[in-house]
Amino acid sequence: MHLEIGGGNLVREGWINLDSRNGEGQWQRCAQQTPWPTGEGTVESIRASHVMEHIPAGQERIDVMNEAHRVLKPGGTFEIIVPLAGTWQAIADPTHVSFWCMESFRYFDGLHSADADYGIKLWETVELYVAGGWEGHWLGRPR
């Protein structure tokens, strides 16, 4: 199973869309409404392109990351693409409720949270880069 979070009308063929407006059946929900309607270790890959900035920072963001961690199969990947803080793409949209910088991802791989317990399930960062000077790309695997 492949899962698109907040895919709107742009979901790849064969992927399930977890989306509050365009999801079908049990998948029509906000990503932070957990648990998701699938079992532990049942998803091969998850993609969230330009949706994580619509999820409030703090516990709701942690809940989404932890739920993705729960449902991914061993070796499965989670791809996140977000507009980076400080760019007009991040701040102009009135529906953006959280901001991301490249260091935001480091809380999920343990680089910045080693001395604190936020309840974050740790990830292995596979890829981390900036595209076009404004778009953060992260690919991670559950540890």
Image: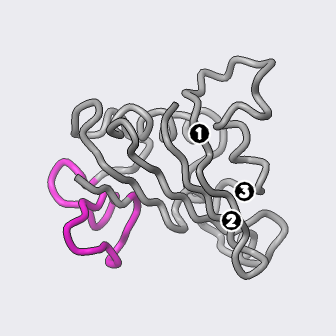
Q: Which residues are magenta?
A: 5-28
Sequence-earlier tag: 3 or 2: 3
* Image position, residue 46 (x, y; %): 39, 54
Find residue 52 and report its image quarter: bottom right
Dot 2: within a 10 Å radius of its alpha carbon, few (fewer than 14), some, or many (20 or more) residues?
A: many
Magenta stretch mostly in which secondary structure?
Answer: loop
Residue at the spot 67% in from the left edge and 58% down from the top edge: 128
Is the residue under label 2 in contact with that under label 3 (CB below 8 Å)?
no
Sooner in the amino-acid sequence: mark 3 or mark 1? 3
Residue under the image location 55 percent in, 38 percent down: 60
| 65 shown above or below 15 | above
Q: Which residue is mark 2?
A: 136
Residue 38 location (% of width, % of height): 22, 38
Q: Nearer the viewer, residue 70 or 73?
A: 73
Q: Residue furthest left?
A: 25
Residue at 42% in and 41% down: 68
Q: Which mark is residue 124?
A: 1
What's under tag 2, amino acid-wise? Gly
Q: Looking at the image, which is closer to me, 18 or 2?
A: 2
Q: Which mark is residue 30?
A: none
Amino acid at the residue labelled 3: Phe
Residue 134 against residue 41 in the figure, above or below: below
Q: Is residue 29 magenta?
A: no
Q: Are marks 1 and 2 in contact (CB under 8 Å)?
A: no
Circle 3 is placed at which residue position? 99
